[in-house]
Amino acid sequence: VAAHKKLATLFYEPSTRTNFSFQTAMMRLGGSVFGFADPSSSSVSKGESIKDTVKMVSNYADVVVMRTPWEGSAKAASLYSNVPVVNAGDGGHMHPTQTMADRTTITRLRGGVDGLCVGLCGDLKNGRTVHSLIKALAKFNDIKFFLISPRELAVPDYMRVFMREHQMWFTEVTGLESVIPQLDVLYMTRIQRERFASEEEYLRLKDSYILTPEKLENAKADLSILHPLPRVNEITVAVDKDPRAAYWRQVKNGKYIRMALILKLLGIQV
Ligand code: NCD
């Protein structure tokens, strides 16, 4: 349905799932793809600004997908683009298309989102998927958020302000085990090494949470365990066999929602 349409993928930061799922989503729709996964192979390495790159690329592409280490960059780029720009992650800020996959997964598993107890665990300061997810879930009712992180990695102030403004129920805790029994959804995240100012600080915090089958013994029988992936060690491989582990389903849903998003941005009805 999207024959002759082109998707550009500009990835200034590492990616596996997001880049591949956007590319294969476009291929499945019959369109084509170009871009870079490593800015050193493009004119970015000659010092070209994002503004110029996007202005130029938007002459070739029908949709631009972009990931950078800089907060607000996709939004800024969209001001200079003739075509839609999708934020595939802007630094430690937001990652809305991961959230679309997360929300679809939750809805499919639980039948809805209202009234759930949602635990968000790990690097809530730098984890952009967490910020987007909280924002998206503001549209639902009676959700209880348990924000589980070391104090150093608690959600940024702008998220706390957002949650208060939207009258969202939340509590910030440092321990995972004590809240696990209450949760319907447990969203684990990676400690974001690349966003730490000091390696020492990272090493001190990197093993803050490690989810094991033993820790899940007191969890609800119908808990949904999510993770945006990539995982480092925060969920042990033994948990993968647990029927409550839903992170591979998230990957699959990520593919479908990206197909739907591309169609919408291209204005194609199916
Ligand atoms: C996430 C990201 O890039 O923010 N990955 C993803 O796109 N699924 C999560 C992470 O890197 O920890």
Image (cartoon, grey):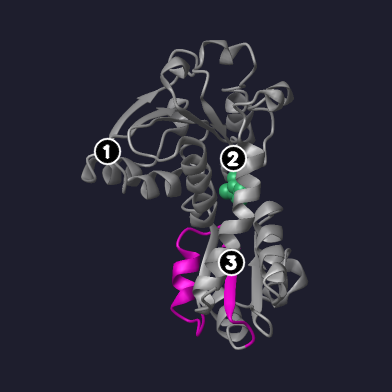
Snapshot quadrant of residue 173: top left
- For the residues labelled 3 and 1, the Cα–Cα distance comes to 30 Å
x and y, in percent, of residue 200 in the image: 62, 30
Q: Which residue is mark 1?
A: 168
Left or right of residue 82: residue 44: right
| Front in this rendered view, residue 228 or 102 | 102
x and y, in percent, of residue 62 in the image: 59, 81
Q: Is mark 2 within 8 Å of ligand 1?
A: yes
Segment tinted magenta in the rendering: 60-83
Q: Which residue is mark 3?
A: 66
Q: Residue at x 59, y 26 (%)?
A: 244
100 inside magenta stretch: no
Q: Which residue is mark 2?
A: 192
Q: Residues within 10 Å of mark 1 (few under 14, many from 20)?
A: many
> Where, quadrant-wise, is the C terminus in this rendering?
bottom right
The kind of residue tagged 1 is Met
Q: On screen, 238 above or below 143? A: above
Snapshot quadrant of residue 205: top right
- For the residues labelled 2 and 3, the Cα–Cα distance comes to 19 Å
Q: On screen, 36 above or below 89? A: below
x and y, in percent, of residue 128 in the image: 50, 47
| Front in this rendered view, residue 121 or 270 | 270
- Asked if residue 68 can be seen in this view, the reply is no
- For the residues labelled 2 and 1, the Cα–Cα distance comes to 26 Å
Q: Residues within 10 Å of mark 3 (few under 14, many from 20)?
A: many
x and y, in percent, of residue 94 in the image: 47, 53
| Front in this rendered view, residue 242 or 85 | 242
Q: Residues within 10 Å of mark 2 (few under 14, many from 20)?
A: some
Q: Nearer the viewer, mark 2 or mark 1?
A: 1
> Where, quadrant-wise, is the N terminus in this rendering?
bottom right
